[in-house]
């Protein structure tokens, strides 16, 4: 039985398209495109040093990013951060957020949560060493 050239070419194109779609889907899942995100709103007296897209770290690991910066009616800066569902357990209403701006590198917001270990003491010690810090007054959880 002989298979025509047109059928071979068509089969090759279909197989290539399926493999390309599978590779794109694999990369999208790996990057967390389909992951549920939670939005937290932080407040601060100043927005100096914060930028949209800035990373949010916990214990040295990137767990989210700053989504938006807004100014409310009272002149308080509202910082909205997005955290994936798998990392939301590290953010609590009594968490402390510190802006860390190194001399070389990217500025980042660092979360210190008060669970088990005394992160408040660590946050105060770290804040004393870091120039240009901003501490969020409160964090409230807002689901999308």
Image (cartoon, rainbow, N blue to C red):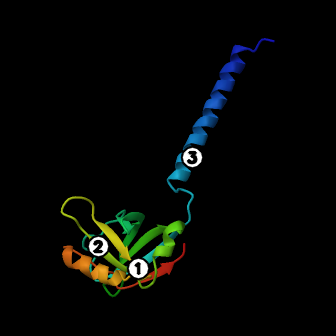
Structural distance between the alpha carbons of marks 1 and 2: 15 Å
- Where is residue 116 shown, x and y percent of the image? 44, 82
Marks 2 and 3 sit apart, C-alpha to C-alpha, by 34 Å
Q: Is residue 116 left or right of residue 12?
A: left
The residue furthest front is 117
Pointers 2 and 3 in contact (C-beta within 8 Å): no
Front residue of this view, candidates 143 and 98? 98
* Callout 1 touching callout 2 (CB < 8 Å): no
Point out which mark residue 36 bears. none
- Specify whether 15 is left or right of 96: right
Q: Compute the Cα span from label 3 to label 1.
A: 33 Å
Q: Badge 3 is on which residue? A: 26
**Quadrant of the image for the N terminus?**
top right
The spot of residue 56 in percent (x, y) is 38, 67
The residue at 39%/63% (across/down) is: 61
Q: Is residue 102 left or right of residue 52?
A: left
Q: Mark 1, mark 2: which one is toward the viewer? A: 1
What secondary structure is found at the residue carrying circle 1?
Answer: loop
The quadrant holding residue 75 is bottom left
Comparing labels 3 and 1, the label whose residue is closer to the camera: 1
Q: Which mark is residue 113?
A: 1
At horizontal 35% and vertical 85% (from top left) the residue drawn is 137
Q: Mark 3 or mark 2, which is nearer the start of the sequence?
A: 3
Q: Nearer the viewer, residue 1 or 48?
A: 1
For label 2, the residue is: 99
Secondary structure at numbered mark 2:
strand
Near mark 1 (Cα within 10 A), the count class, few <14, some 14-19 or many ≥20, is many
Helix, strand or loop at label 3? It is helix
Judging depth in this view, the residue of 69 and 85 nearest the camera is 85
């Amino acid at each position: 039985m002989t298979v025509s050239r047109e059928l071979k070419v068509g089969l090759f194109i279909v197989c290539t398209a399926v493999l390309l779609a599978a590779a794109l889907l694999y990369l999208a899942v790996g990057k967390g495109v389909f992951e549920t995100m939670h939005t937290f709103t932080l407040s601060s007296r100043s927005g100096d040093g914060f930028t949209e897209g800035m990373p949010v770290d916990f214990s040295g690991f990137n767990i989210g990013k700053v989504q938006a910066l807004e100014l409310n009616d009272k002149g308080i800066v509202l910082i909205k951060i997005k955290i994936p569902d798998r990392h939301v357990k590290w953010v609590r209403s009594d968490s402390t957020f510190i802006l860390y701006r190194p001399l070389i590198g990217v500025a980042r917001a660092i979360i210190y949560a008060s669970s088990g270990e005394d992160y408040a003491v660590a946050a105060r010690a770290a804040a004393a060493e870091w120039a240009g810090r901003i501490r969020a007054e409160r964090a409230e959880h807002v689901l999308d």
